[in-house]
């Protein structure tokens, strides 16, 4: 009859703890990335709006969030907002804090790509009397997407790695799970090596997709697609 050895029991315990932490990390990454993608487009369009109030509001949003540490923002949302009667769960705090922080950078990527669409295309849009929404959907956005998606993809990879900060607001993510295992088992080198590998395995598919898309865009440009 097969009897589990202490080493097997330890390995199962480590795998279980890290898998649980990795799942929390992936959930935060997924929902924070949804916020980033949505707000990046909204804020970028606000900054390009003909209405001054929208432009100023979006500019203030970008400048404030780019000037604040993501960690400080997480602390503020988690520890300070409850003093004003607003309490967020650790998961909500992590998703919202990282989503807001990275959306400020993402909005600049989107805005830059939209602005770089040639003036000739914009003149054609006006000549054809397209509505702003139709022009954005059918003319400007399809040309801007190839230029904004690679840097946006890199931002999302960076966001996934930055989720390690949520361990400081009591969330048992991959980093926090690793720290708990080190405290419990004392196998520091082994545990942190496994954690490093876990982050690489989670980030690699997105990094690969970004590289493949960049190669596709490079080939498209060489073929004259940017003309």
Image (cartoon, helix red, strand yellow):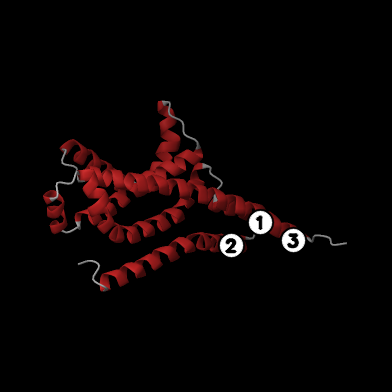
Horizontally, residue 118 falls left or right of residue 189, namely: left
Q: Residue at x 27, y 53 (%)?
A: 141
Q: Are marks 1 and 2 in contact (CB under 8 Å)?
A: yes
Give the residue at mark 3: 8
- Separation of marks 2 and 3 at Cα, in angstroms: 16 Å
Residue assigned mark 2:
194
Residue 177 position, x and y percent, is 59, 51
Q: Position of residue 167 (x, y in %)?
A: 51, 47
Q: Which of the labelled discs sits on residue 156, or is there none?
A: none
Q: Residues within 10 Å of mark 3 (few under 14, many from 20)?
A: few
Which residue is tagged 1?
14
Q: Earlier in the sequence, mark 3 or mark 1?
A: 3
First in sequence: mark 2 vs mark 3? 3
Vertical comparison of 85 with 32: above or below: above
Between the residue at mark 1 and the residue at mark 2, the CA separation in whole angstroms equals 9 Å
Q: Position of residue 225 (x, y in %)?
A: 25, 67
Q: Are marks 2 and 3 in contact (CB under 8 Å)?
A: no
Q: Secondary structure at mark 1?
A: helix
- Distance in Å between CA atoms under marks 3 and 1: 10 Å
């Amino acid at each position: 009859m097969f009897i589990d050895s202490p080493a097997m029991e330890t390995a199962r315990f480590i795998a279980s703890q890290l898998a649980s932490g990795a799942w929390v990390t992936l959930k935060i990454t997924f929902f924070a990335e949804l916020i980033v993608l949505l707000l990046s487009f909204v804020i970028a369009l606000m900054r390009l709006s003909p209405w001054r109030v929208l432009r100023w509001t979006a500019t203030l949003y970008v400048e404030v969030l780019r000037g604040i540490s993501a960690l400080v923002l997480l602390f503020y949302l988690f520890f300070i907002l409850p003093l004003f009667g607003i309490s967020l769960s650790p998961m909500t705090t992590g998703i919202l804090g990282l989503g807001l922080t990275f959306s400020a950078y993402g909005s600049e990527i989107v805005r830059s790509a939209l602005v770089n669409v040639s003036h000739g295309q914009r003149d054609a849009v006006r000549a054809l009397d397209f509505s702003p929404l139709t022009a954005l959907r059918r003319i400007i956005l399809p040309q801007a997407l190839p230029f904004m998606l690679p840097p946006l993809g890199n931002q999302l990879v960076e966001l996934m790695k930055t989720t390690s900060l949520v361990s400081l607001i009591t969330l048992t993510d991959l980093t926090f799970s690793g720290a708990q295992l080190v405290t419990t088992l004392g196998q520091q080198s082994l545990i942190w090596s496994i954690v490093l590998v876990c982050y690489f395995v989670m980030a690699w598919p997105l990094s690969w997709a970004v590289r493949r898309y960049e190669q596709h865009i490079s080939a498209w440009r060489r073929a004259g697609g940017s003309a």
